[in-house]
Image (cartoon, rainbow, N blue to C red):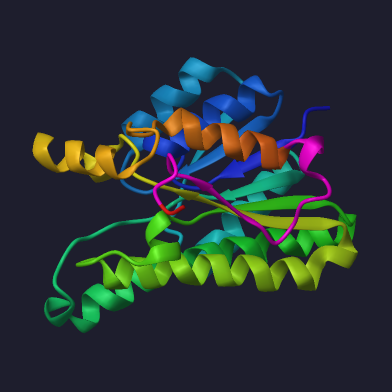
Amino acid sequence: MKKVALVTGGAKGIGSAVVKRLINDGYKVALTYNNSEEKALKLCADMGAGCRAYKLDITDSNSVNSVVSDIEKNFGEIAILVNNAGIAEQTLFTDITDEMWHRMIETNLSGAFYCSRAVLKYMINRKSGKIINISSIWGETGGSCEVHYSASKAGIIGMTKALAKEVGLSGITVNSVSPGVILTDMTSHFDEETMNSLKEEAPLNKIGTPEDVAGAVSFLASKDADFITGQNISVNGGMNI
């Protein structure tokens, strides 16, 4: 029987690449989406019966619990959780409103907390499982005009390290992946000059792809990473070395 991976925000970008990679690795994948229903349904149609899409607002803990319960009962036991869903926003620190701050933290950090808490109920009982959180290079180094985003992603890394210590004796690993500049919708608004400047900051002198991040997730989900926990893998072309 194939193991089930749950990928939040799996309809596009990094999430879509992760879904495809994990299905190719032999997992059944349950992906969640919020506003990208058409893309989510098409992706699952393309990937076949081993993929199911679930509409979910990850900021609603009750909805998270309900979807996780549905997956466990009707699709299979969740062996892998990839907390990928998130938002980004650029604005001056002094222009960040209370609403913008709370929306960023609630989506990027609280959403990962709600999903992790929901699946751990089952993983701890089975004494197995892997949680893989998607952070960001700005969670490591901080990004100008992205203070609220950077704070939410730094929180992901802190949560990863703390939770790994707490659930290790239950046979569960918790790690994070920090993408650098990746060709997704989140970078599509940058002009060519900005993208070239960002590329030059990386020793590899190129921009990453969603598949680069999916490769790191695939490794952490595999048996080759069974003795790795509490770690953050940077997938950024060397930008922060």
Residue located at (44% from left, 44% from top): 238
Instruction: Give the camera-side residue of 141 and 84.
Output: 141
Instruction: Give the camera-side residue of 58 and 91.
Output: 91
Please determine whether, in this image, residue 67 is positioned above or below residue 192.
Answer: below
**The N terminus appears in which quarter of the rendering?**
top right
Q: Is residue 211 left or right of residue 138?
A: right
Q: Horizontal and vertical percent for residue 100?
A: 23, 73
State whether residue 23 appears in this view: yes
Instruction: Give the camera-side residue of 196 and 117.
Output: 196
State whether residue 191 appears in this view: no
Q: Horizontal and vertical percent for residue 3?
A: 76, 34
Q: How many marks?
A: 0
Residue located at (78% from left, 28% from top): 2
Magenta stretch: residue 31 in it? no
Q: Horizontal and vertical percent for residue 229?
A: 74, 57
Asked which quadrant contains residue 223, the reply is top right
Highlighted magenta segment, given as a residue range: 222-239
The secondary structure making up most of the magenta span is: loop
Please determine whether, in this image, residue 230 is positioned above or below residue 235.
Answer: below
